Structures are given as C-alpha cells and as structure tokens.
C-alpha cells in the first residue's frame, strides 16, 4: 500500500461525519444502558424471566465448555 493511501486511511473525516458518529455512539450507549436497566428490573420482579435467563445461561455455558473440551482434544492436549 502506498504512503498516500495509508495517509488517506488515517485522515479524519469531515467535521459533520465526526459529529454524526459521536451522536450515534452516544445514542447507542444510552439505549444499551436503558436496556440493561429494564432487564435488571424485569429480572428482579419476574421470576419466570429470571428462570428462563438462568436456563439460557446454563445451556450456553455447557456449550462453551463442550467446545473447549473438543478444541483441547483436537489439539492433542488430553
């Protein structure tokens, strides 16, 4: 890659683009925070939702552990 192309890659965009990106990132962070707060409230007040989440987490952990075990066997570590 030429030096000119590398410089273009690192050159910041226009001020308008940077402002739009900053606003988008702020909105995404706000939405994520709001979603987290709603989820925490639901888990505190709804035992069925809490049970469902616990089940999903357990299943995912089993899957990850199984994949790690298979990966270890494939690499000859066991």
Image (tube, rainbow, N blue to C red):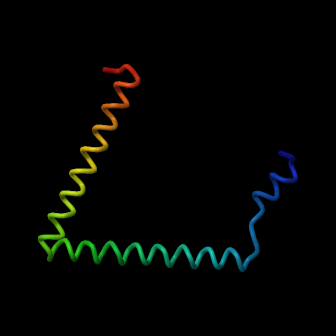
Residue 49 in the image, given as x and y percentages of width and height: 18, 70
Is 45 left or right of 10, judged from the image as shown?
A: left
Asked whether 47 or 2 is in front, the reply is 47
Residue 31 in the image, given as x and y percentages of width and height: 42, 77
Residue drawn at x 68%, y 74% is 18
Residue drawn at x 13%, y 70% is 48
Residue 52 in which image quadrant: bottom left
- Determine whether 1 is above or below 10 in the image: above
Is 56 left or right of 25, judged from the image as shown?
A: left
Residue 57 in which image quadrant: bottom left
Asked whether 2 or 54 is in front, the reply is 54
Q: Quadrant of the C terminus?
A: top left
Residue drawn at x 48%, y 74% is 28
Residue 11 in which image quadrant: bottom right
- Determine whether 31 is above or below 9 in the image: below
Is 46 left or right of 62, judged from the image as shown?
A: left
Residue drawn at x 52%, y 76% is 26
Residue 27 in the image, given as x and y percentages of width and height: 50, 79
Asked whether 70 or 34 is in front, the reply is 70
């Amino acid at each position: 890659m030429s030096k000119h192309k590398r410089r273009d890659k690192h050159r910041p965009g226009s001020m308008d683009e940077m402002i739009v990106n900053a606003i988008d990132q702020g909105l995404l962070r706000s939405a994520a925070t709001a979603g987290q707060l709603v989820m925490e409230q639901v888990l505190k007040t709804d035992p069925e939702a809490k049970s469902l989440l616990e089940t999903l987490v357990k299943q995912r952990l089993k899957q990850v552990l199984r994949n790690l075990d298979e990966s270890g066997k494939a690499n000859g570590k066991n």
